Image (cartoon, rainbow, N blue to C red):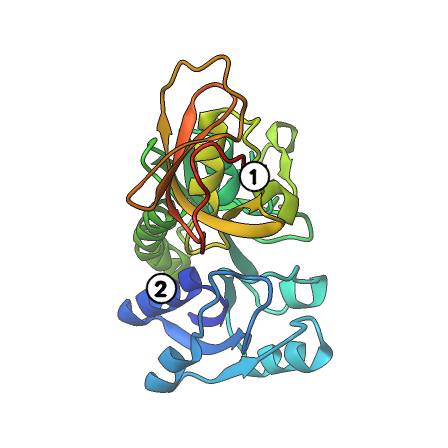
Amino acid sequence: MKIVFVGTVEFSKNALAKLIDLRANIAGTLTKAKSNFNADFADITDICRRNGIPYKYVTDINLQENTDWIKNLKADIIFCFGFSQILKRDILNITPMGVIGFHPAKLPQNRGRHPIVWPLVLGLRKTASTFFFMDEGVDSGDILSQADIDITYEDDARTLYDKVTETALRQIKEFIPKLQDKSYIRTPQAGSNSNLWRKRTKEDGEIDFRMSSRAIYNLVRALTRPYVGAHLVYGGSEIKVWKVKEVEMDLPNVEYGKVLDIRNNQILVKCFDNAVLLVEHEFGKLPKAGDYIS
């Protein structure tokens, strides 16, 4: 079974390495030289060069020259694992077995954008790793493999990303033989049970101390590395915040955004219901106790 591999993020690199470890026949890869969109961008071409795999940098994968390049590889299937463009019909129909996509959420629910970020922002306790046959819809094709993943209070973007990756690599090991001997099962999605997560905006990443301590905690852990980080505004400047802790405090007469204490470079700030301790941040000059952060 000859595979064309498409990907441009950290997970793509891990998945490609796993496929090579499994001695899968990778006919060629398409990737990007850089990305202004993916905070977890990773260059997969070093793996390709070490293993003698042809690769092609693309900006628009749907251009005719890229379609022709894929056709010339005469592959059986395409794996698209971590790529920020919609594949059009011409590419979806090139290989006889179609295109397998990857979505780290429990389809048919939670289709769409930022499937690592939104579960943490929303405080969900479960997600999933899903491989599916791509069609012209958004994450709507038949499911090939799906595995549930628990989300703990302690999880953040880094740990959840790692959990998803670990789970997905096990799935790849399980379904490759099934694809090779045609024993796999396609499970149609029930579209009536689906919802579509929207694209996150910069404003979605701003800490507002009118929020509850849990909402702030969830926002910060969702956007921490490998992503762009949450931010707050102080003195007219945006300041990144990478880690916070919730602190229970009964201070009903203290306004939100007030700095309560500063110790060891950590800043305690009143929010709507409790307080949050800014543990890891990018303040150059620290505020003083009694100051207000908007």
- Residue drawn at the location 28% of the way across and 67% of the way down: 22
Residue labelled with disc 1: 188
From the image, which quarter does the C terminus lie in?
A: top right
Find residue 42 and report its horizontal and vertical position in percent: 44, 69
Instruction: Answer left or right for 95 relative to 225.
Output: right
> Between 230 and 72, which is closer to the camera in this rendering?
230
Nearest to the eye among marks 2 and 1: give it. 2
User: Toward the viewer: 97 or 90?
Assistant: 90
- Which element carries disc 2, helix, strand or loop? helix
Crowding at mark 2 (Cα within 10 Å: few <14, some 14-19, many 20+):
some
Pick the residue in front: 20 or 231.
231
The image quadrant where one finds the N terminus is bottom left
Instruction: Please state which amino acid type lies under the numbered disc 1.
Output: Pro
Of the residues shown, which amino acid type is indicated by label 2? Asn
Residue 174 appears anywhere in the view? yes
Residue at (42%, 26%) from the top-left corner?
275
Identify the mark nearer the N-term, 2 or 1: 2
| Location of residue 95 in the rendering, given as x and y in whole percent from the top left corner | 58, 68
Residue to which mark 2 is pinned: 14
Residue for point 41% across, 60% down:
11
Residue 196: quadrant of the picture: top right
Figure quadrant of residue 148: top left
Picture layout, residue 138 above or below residue 28: above
- Tell me which residue sits at (51%, 31%) in the image: 122
Given residues 27 and 233, the one toward you in this image is 233
Relative to 234, is 59 above or below? below
Helix, strand or loop under label 1: loop
Q: Position of residue 17 (x, y in %)?
A: 33, 69
